[in-house]
Amino acid sequence: MKLIIGIGNPDKEYQNTRHNVGFMLLDYMTKKSDLGDFKLDKKSDSLIVKGRLGKSSVVLAKPQNYVNKSGEAVSKLIKNLKLKIENLAVIHDDLDIPFGNTKLSLGKNSGGHKGVESIMRAVKTKDFYRLRIGTAKRALDNARDQSDKKRDEFVRNFVLSKFSPSEQDELKKIFKEGYEKLLGIIN
């Protein structure tokens, strides 16, 4: 069995924001594969759906704690499902990758993503797959040259902002590409 985690924030106000792109891709996957609806798993405090993708049994999960505490739910899911870490894939936004691109990685550092850092601390390794969905825009380049406080505020506001209508159209292509990459590692 494979566990695919989408990172995001649970509250309604965060739906369709850049930080919730992991949740959004899981929604795309459940519709495309006809997996049904997510249901709350109280043991892990996650919304989950179980089914098959290609040849593999999968659990898709949306932790219901905030991004920066994603590791709490992930460690519970791994323990409850009795999974090995090599069967884990995490989907998240990435500010170092230009919008429109995805990157599959294994065993890389967090790149400063607090949700990924939380997962790495909880599972005590970085040796799991990550599908990184690029959200970077030119405006981030200017923010990198500002003071730490201004930069952090800009980044926080940016990742919690919603996608524009044209970006939402492009997400369809991005999600198709991400879905195919995930199928490649789970089958």
Image: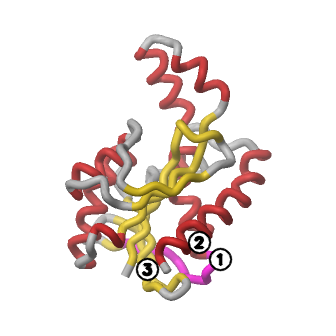
Give the amino acid at mark 2.
Met
Task: Name the residue beneath numbered marker 2.
Answer: 29
Task: Name the residue beneath numbered marker 3.
Answer: 58
Q: CA distance from mark 1 to mark 2?
A: 5 Å
Element class at badge 3 = strand
Q: Write down the region rendered in magenta.
A: 31-40
Mark 1 surroundings: few (<14), some (14-19) or many (≥20) residues within 10 A: few
Q: Residue at x 52, y 47 (%)?
A: 93
Q: Is residue 18 in the magenta section?
A: no
Q: Which of 88 and 147 lies nearest the eye of the viewer?
A: 88
Q: Is residue 34 in the magenta section?
A: yes
Tell me whether circle 1 and circle 2 mark residues in contact (CB < 8 Å): yes
Residue 54 to residue 104: above or below: below
- Res. 4 image quadrant: bottom left
Decide if residue 19 is on the left or right side of residue 68: right
Q: Residue at x 35, y 44 (%)?
A: 109
Element class at badge 1 = helix
Give the amino acid at mark 1.
Lys
Query: Which quadrant of the rendered structure holds the N terminus?
Result: bottom left
Rendering coords of residue 39 (x, y %): 43, 75
Rendering coords of residue 101 (x, y %): 64, 49
Q: Residue at x 35, y 72 (%)?
A: 87
Say which label, 3 or 2, has the lower sequence index: 2
Mark 2 surroundings: few (<14), some (14-19) or many (≥20) residues within 10 A: many
Q: Main secondary structure of the magenta part?
A: loop
Task: Name the residue beneath numbered marker 1.
Answer: 32
Decide if residue 178 is on the left or right side of residue 110: right
Q: CA distance from mark 3 to mark 1?
A: 14 Å
Residue 56 to residue 11: above or below: below
Q: Residue at x 24, y 63 (%)?
A: 75
